[in-house]
Each structure stands twice: as structure tokens, then as C-alpha cells.
Amino acid sequence: MQRFFSCLFCCCLALLCSACAATWGAKGLVKDSETSLLLVLPVSGGDPWEKESSFIRSAFIAELTLAGYRCLSPSLIDGVIRNATKEAEVNSDDSVAIVKISERGIAVSPSIPLKVIADKLSADAIFHIEIVEATRTTSVFSAYYRLHIRFQKRSARTGEKLWAREYNESDSVWGFNKLRMKTENTIGYSNALSTIIRRAVIDSKKGEMD
């Protein structure tokens, strides 16, 4: 009887070890498949949406961090972009170079491949965000907002597009109190912006594309 229980215990222990090994192996595969270090570029879209650009980038990085990713500091990224731009004698001032994106990949305007920036920072993947539209208007009887934002993720090593998606949000408020409508419109606009950012992080992790 004692021998039977000893054999049973050994079998259970072997099964447990096997299950643990499989679990850790699966976790290892998941970890290897996920990007270990992300580079989020300055948001493009022009001067009219400077405040939105700064918020979107910071909030997106915060959400990615909460999702378990490691993200490079924006100030570090911008500094490397500035230095690379100066080294290439493309731009001699302190402004961040404009980021261009096309089917061939992402580049710092006009001729610096982003791989140069990614290599300097040892990044694994690059996020580019573009504000297509971020409009808020308030008239006598209505207030309206519309958001249209594009997200794209590429491999820092190959430039391959890993994920891309566009998000649209809009709403309107009607009434006679202009201050109330403006307040409600601002709150709705801010909430919609935050929702888009959260959805983008979730969708990018799933790999869902338009």
C-alpha cells in the first residue's frame, strides 16, 4: 500500500511539473511575441491641435504602460530625433523634426529613416499617431465635436506594418444655454479622446486592423 501511494505521489508530481513547464513555456512565448520596448513618436497633425497632440501621446504611453509594455520617455525620443536631424544637417533649430509616414515606412522628414532613431534607442516597435481632425464648435443653439485619429505600429527592425487603425468619434449638444452646452461639449470631447486611446491600446495588443 505504501508503495502504491509512493508511485501515485510520483506520478502526480510528474504531471504537476509537466503542467508548470507548459504554462511557463506558454508565458515565455507570449512574452517573446510581445514588444518589449516601444517608441511612441510625436503626434503629427499640425499646430492647431498642439494641446491634443501632447495629451494623446502622454495618455497613450500611460495606457501602454498599464497594459504591461515598457515605453521610452518622450523627452529621450525627441532629443535623439533632434540630434539625428542636426547630424544630418537637415534642420539646425531645436524643434522636433516632422515625422512622415508612407507605405514604405516611417521617416523623420525629409530623409532620416526612423530605423536610425530606433536603433539608437534599442526600440523593438514604433507607434505613430496622426490627428486627422479634432474639432470643437459652439454656436447659439448647439455644440459639436468630431475626432478622427489614426494609429500605426511598425517593427523597428524591418519597418513592417504590424498594426494600423483609425478611430472616429462625434457628438452634438442642443439647447439655449451656451455655457452649459460648451461645458458638456468639452466633457464629451475629453471622454471621447480618452476612449479612443484606450481602444487603440486594446486593439493594438490584439493586432486588430481596419
Image (cartoon, rainbow, N blue to C red):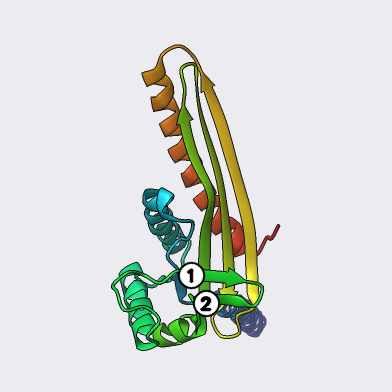
Say few, some or many: other residues with alpha carbon within 10 Å of mark 1 (under 14 / 14 to 19 / 20 or more): many
Task: Specify whether residue 210 is in view.
Answer: yes
Q: Secondary structure at mark 1?
A: strand
User: Residue type at mark 1?
Assistant: Val
Residue at the image point whose x is 43% and y is 39% from the top: 190
Q: Position of residue 130 (x, y in %)?
A: 52, 58
Mark drawn on residue 99 = 1
Give the Cα separation between the discs numbered 1 and 2: 6 Å
Residue at the image point whose x is 71% and y is 57% from the top: 210
Q: Position of residue 98 (x, y in %)?
A: 45, 69
Q: Are circles 1 and 2 on residues that touch, CB within 8 Å?
A: yes
Q: Report which residue position mark 2 lands on.
A: 107
138 displayed left or right of 165: left
Q: Quadrant of residue 177?
A: top left
Q: Secondary structure at mark 2?
A: strand
Task: Specify whether residue 12 is in view.
Answer: no
Q: Position of residue 109 (x, y in %)?
A: 48, 75
73 displayed left or right of 99: left
Say few, some or many: other residues with alpha carbon within 10 Å of mark 2 (under 14 / 14 to 19 / 20 or more): some
Outermost residue on the top side: it is: 176
Residue at the image point whose x is 35% and y is 88% from the top: 87
User: Residue type at mark 2?
Assistant: Ala
Q: Quadrant of residue 39?
A: bottom left
Residue at the image point whose x is 40% and y is 54% from the top: 47
62 displayed left or right of 115: left
Q: Quadrant of residue 202?
A: bottom right
Residue 128's place in the image compared with 114, above or below, is above
Mark drawn on residue 56 = none
